Image (tube, rainbow, N blue to C red):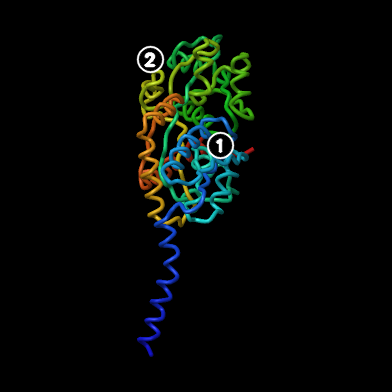
C-alpha cells in the first residue's frame, strides 16, 4: 500500500508538471506583450519596438508593444507585476520606476527586487548637461564656478520630481557642491521649451531630446552624463572628467513577473542578445545615442541593486519627496 501511494504521488506530480514543461519547451505559444510604461514615440518606445520586431520574427509569434503611461512609469510596471509569470508579459523597465521611485514613494505597490525578474539590460542612453546661451559658462568647470559664485541664482529644469534627469541634476549638485534651484515640469518638452526661452538656466535631459536643439545652436551643451565620452558627441567631455565617479544614464531593460521560469528567462535574454548584434538594430539604437548592452539576468539584477542603493542616498541627501 505504501509503495502504491508513493507511486500515485509521483505520477500525480509528473502529470501536474507536464503542461508547464511543455509550455516552456514551446515558448512562446501565444502572442507576447511588452509593456512600455511611457507614451508612444519616446526613447523607451523606440527601443521596445526595435527589439519586439526582431523577437517576433525569431519566435514566429506576434510581439505586441503596449504603452501604459502614468504615475512616472509605475502604472505600467505594476500591471506587469500582476501578470501571469509565464513569459508572455514583460515590461521594458526604465531607471525611474525601478530604481528611483521606490525611494521616494513609500506607498509603491511593488518591490522591484522582490516582484520582478530581471531578464536583460538592453541599452543605456546618456543625458546632456546643457544651458541657455545667455549663461556665462562654456564648459562644466565654468558652470560650477558660476554656480558657486551665485548660490541659488541658477536654476535647472527637469521632466518632473523623481525622474531620472531630476536625480541626475541632484547628483551633480551634490558632487560639485553647488546650489542650483530645481524647477520641475510635467514632461521633458515643456522643460526644454522654457530653457530655450531663457526662463531657466540649465537642463539635464536625454540625448535624443536635446541633440536637435544643440545642433541648431538654441542651447549650449557642456557635458554628457556617461563615465566616458559618447560616440554620438565625441568632442563633448563627460561629467566624470571633471567630477570623477559621476554617472547618470537612462537605461532600458526587459523584466518579467517574479516566478517566471528560468529557462524562459534565459531564452528571451539569448534572443535579445542575438537581435542586438544585428546591424540595423545597432544603427537604430546608435541614432538615439544609445549603448547596446544585452546583459545577463544576473548582471541586470546586480545593476538594479546597485542603482537602488546609489539613488537612495542621493534622494535622502536631497530630501526629495513625492508630490
Residue 186 in the image, given as x and y percentages of width and height: 64, 30
In the image, 9: left or right of 106? left
- Residue at the disc numbered 2: 235
Q: In the rendered structure, which disc, 1 or 2, sits on the residue that comes first in sequence? A: 2
Q: What element carries label 2?
A: loop
Q: Quadrant of residue 16?
A: bottom left
In the image, 120: left or right of 63? left
Q: Is mark 1 on a helix, strand or loop?
A: loop
Q: Could you tell me how far apart the alpha carbons at marks 1 and 2 are, in whole angstroms? A: 35 Å
The C terminus: image quadrant: top right
Asked whether residue 230 appears in the rendered view, the answer is yes
Looking at the picture, does residue 3 appear above or below residue 13? Answer: below
Asked whether residue 103 appears in the rendered view, the answer is no
Q: In which quarter of the image is residue 284?
A: top left
Residue situated in front as seen by the camera: 208 or 23: 23
In the image, what residue occupies the spot 44% across and 24% down?
Answer: 287
Residue 87 in the image, given as x and y percentages of width and height: 47, 52
Q: Residues within 10 Å of mark 2 (few under 14, many from 20)?
A: few
In the image, what residue occupies the spot 60% across and 34% down?
Answer: 39
Residue 121 in the image, given as x and y percentages of width and height: 41, 40
Residue situated in front as seen by the camera: 30 or 195: 30
Q: Nearer the viewer, mark 1 or mark 2?
A: 2
Residue situated in front as seen by the camera: 4 or 229: 4
- Residue at the disc numbered 1: 319
Amino acid at each position: 500500500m505504501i509503495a502504491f501511494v508513493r507511486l500515485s504521488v509521483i505520477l500525480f506530480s509528473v502529470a501536474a508538471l507536464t503542461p508547464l514543461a511543455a509550455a516552456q519547451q514551446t515558448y512562446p505559444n501565444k502572442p507576447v506583450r511588452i509593456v512600455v510604461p511611457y507614451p508612444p514615440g519616446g526613447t523607451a518606445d523606440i527601443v521596445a519596438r526595435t527589439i519586439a520586431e526582431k523577437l517576433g520574427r525569431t519566435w514566429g509569434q506576434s510581439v505586441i508593444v503596449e504603452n501604459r503611461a502614468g504615475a512616472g512609469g509605475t502604472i505600467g510596471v505594476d500591471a506587469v507585476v500582476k501578470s501571469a509569470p509565464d513569459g508572455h508579459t514583460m515590461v521594458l523597465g526604465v531607471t525611474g520606476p525601478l530604481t528611483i521611485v521606490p525611494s521616494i514613494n513609500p506607498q509603491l505597490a511593488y518591490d522591484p527586487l522582490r516582484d520582478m525578474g530581471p531578464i536583460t539590460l538592453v541599452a543605456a542612453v546618456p543625458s546632456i548637461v546643457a544651458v541657455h546661451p545667455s549663461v556665462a559658462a562654456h564648459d562644466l568647470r565654468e558652470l560650477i564656478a558660476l554656480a558657486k559664485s551665485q548660490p541659488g541664482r541658477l536654476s535647472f529644469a527637469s521632466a518632473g520630481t523623481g525622474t531620472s534627469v531630476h536625480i541626475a541634476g541632484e547628483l551633480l549638485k551634490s558632487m560639485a557642491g553647488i546650489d542650483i534651484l530645481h524647477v520641475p515640469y510635467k514632461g521633458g518638452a515643456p522643460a526644454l521649451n522654457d530653457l530655450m526661452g531663457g526662463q531657466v538656466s540649465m537642463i539635464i535631459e536625454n540625448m535624443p531630446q536635446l541633440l536637435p536643439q544643440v545642433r541648431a545652436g538654441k542651447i549650449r551643451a557642456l557635458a554628457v552624463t556617461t563615465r566616458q565620452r559618447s560616440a554620438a558627441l565625441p568632442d563633448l567631455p563627460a561629467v566624470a572628467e571633471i567630477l570623477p565617479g559621476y554617472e547618470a544614464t537612462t537605461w532600458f531593460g526587459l523584466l518579467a513577473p517574479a516566478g517566471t521560469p528560468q529557462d524562459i528567462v534565459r531564452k528571451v535574454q539569448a534572443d535579445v542578445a542575438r537581435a542586438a548584434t544585428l546591424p540595423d538594430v545597432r544603427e537604430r539604437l546608435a541614432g538615439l545615442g544609445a549603448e547596446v548592452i544585452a546583459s545577463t539576468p544576473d548582471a541586470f539584477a546586480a545593476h538594479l541593486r546597485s542603482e537602488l542603493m546609489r539613488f537612495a542616498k542621493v534622494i535622502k541627501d536631497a530630501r526629495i519627496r513625492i508630490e
